[in-house]
Each structure stands twice: as C-alpha cells, then as structure tokens.
C-alpha cells in the first residue's frame, strides 16, 4: 500500500466505511475486523483501529458491549440506527462515485464545465439580462 499522507487520509475514510458496513450486519470485534481489513490490503495497527472504533462510537454510529469469551473480555461493536442511516447514505454516494470514477460516467460534470466555459462576454450578458 502506498504510504503517503494523502493516501492514508483517503484510506481512513474507506476503513471507517468498511467497519460500519460489517458492524451493520452483525456485532464485530477488533481482531476479526483487523483481519478483514488486512484481507483487503489495509495495514492496520491497534493504534489505528481502536481510535477509529471509538470515533464511530462517539459519533453515535456504533455502540459497544462486552462479553467474556474463553475467559477474556471482548468488546463487540454494532451499528446503531444512526450508523445504519449514515451507511445507507454513504452507499448511495459511493455508487455515484464508482460510476463516475471507475465507469467514467461524468456527463453531469461535463455539463457544468460547459456552462462555466462559455465565453466571458456571453456569461456577463446573461447575468445582466442582455442578449449577445
């Protein structure tokens, strides 16, 4: 994985979305979600994962509960109703982004660009209500 600051910034957003996705399906705990993220190529330390889980919890997207498993305490995280709503919105935005970035469906942006690239005098005339 590329290790520059901007790339890490983008990937932390992907990680948060990925965590929220799995926590919306069923309760998750740190070690298993770390393994899942590693499977996708993210190098993630506990020093990154647990602050991310706490952030999502503080935002009201996750709630946690503790269970004792084989004599050890394990914190499970599950998406709240708010987290599920945020995930639904994020999925919609992600679908738009995938269509635009991966499938090159950027016609709405091209329309905006054409509008802003009209000759300067034509833009001014239309702003002042005058015809060229």
Image (cartoon, rainbow, N blue to C red):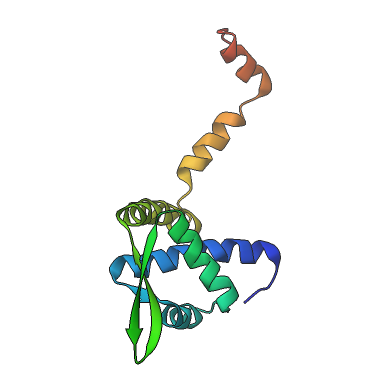
Frontmost residue, 42 versus 126: 42
State which quadrant residue 124 falls in. Answer: top right
Q: What count of labels does the image hold? A: 0
Q: Quadrant of the N terminus?
A: bottom right
Residue at the (38%, 61%) spot, across then down:
62
Q: Position of residue 70 (x, y in %)?
A: 34, 92
Q: Quadrant of the C terminus?
A: top right
State which quadrant residue 76 falls in. Answer: bottom left
> Does residue 44 appear anywhere in the picture?
no
Frontmost residue, 66 versus 88: 66
In the depicted structure, whether residue 130 falls above or below residue 26: above
Frontmost residue, 117 versus 93: 93
Considering every residue shown, the one lying at the far right of the view is 4
In the figure, is residue 83 to the left or right of 128?
Answer: left
State which quadrant residue 128 falls in. Answer: top right
Considering every residue shown, the one lying at the far bottom of the view is 70
In the depicted structure, whether residue 128 falls above or below residue 91: above
Q: Position of residue 69 (x, y in %)?
A: 34, 87
Residue at the (56%, 34%) spot, across then down:
114
> Does residue 69 appear anywhere in the picture?
yes
Residue at the (53%, 72%) spot, across then down:
49
In the depicted structure, whether residue 26 falls above or below residue 129: below
Frontmost residue, 53 versus 112: 53
Q: Position of residue 83 (x, y in %)?
A: 36, 56
In the figure, is residue 21 to the left or right of 48?
Answer: left
Q: Position of residue 5 (x, y in %)?
A: 69, 64
């Amino acid at each position: 994985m590329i290790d520059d600051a901007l790339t890490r910034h983008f990937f932390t957003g992907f990680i948060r979305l990925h965590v929220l996705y799995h926590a919306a399906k069923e309760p998750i705990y740190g070690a298993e979600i770390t393994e899942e993220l590693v499977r996708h190529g993210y190098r993630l330390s506990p020093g990154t994962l647990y602050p991310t889980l706490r952030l999502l919890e503080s935002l009201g997207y996750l709630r946690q509960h503790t269970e004792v498993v084989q004599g050890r305490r394990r914190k499970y995280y599950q998406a709240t109703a708010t987290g599920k709503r945020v995930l639904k919105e994020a999925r919609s935005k992600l679908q738009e982004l995938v269509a635009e970035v991966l499938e090159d469906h950027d016609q709405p942006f091209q329309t905006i660009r054409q509008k802003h690239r009209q000759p300067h005098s034509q833009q001014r005339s239309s702003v002042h209500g005058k015809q060229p």
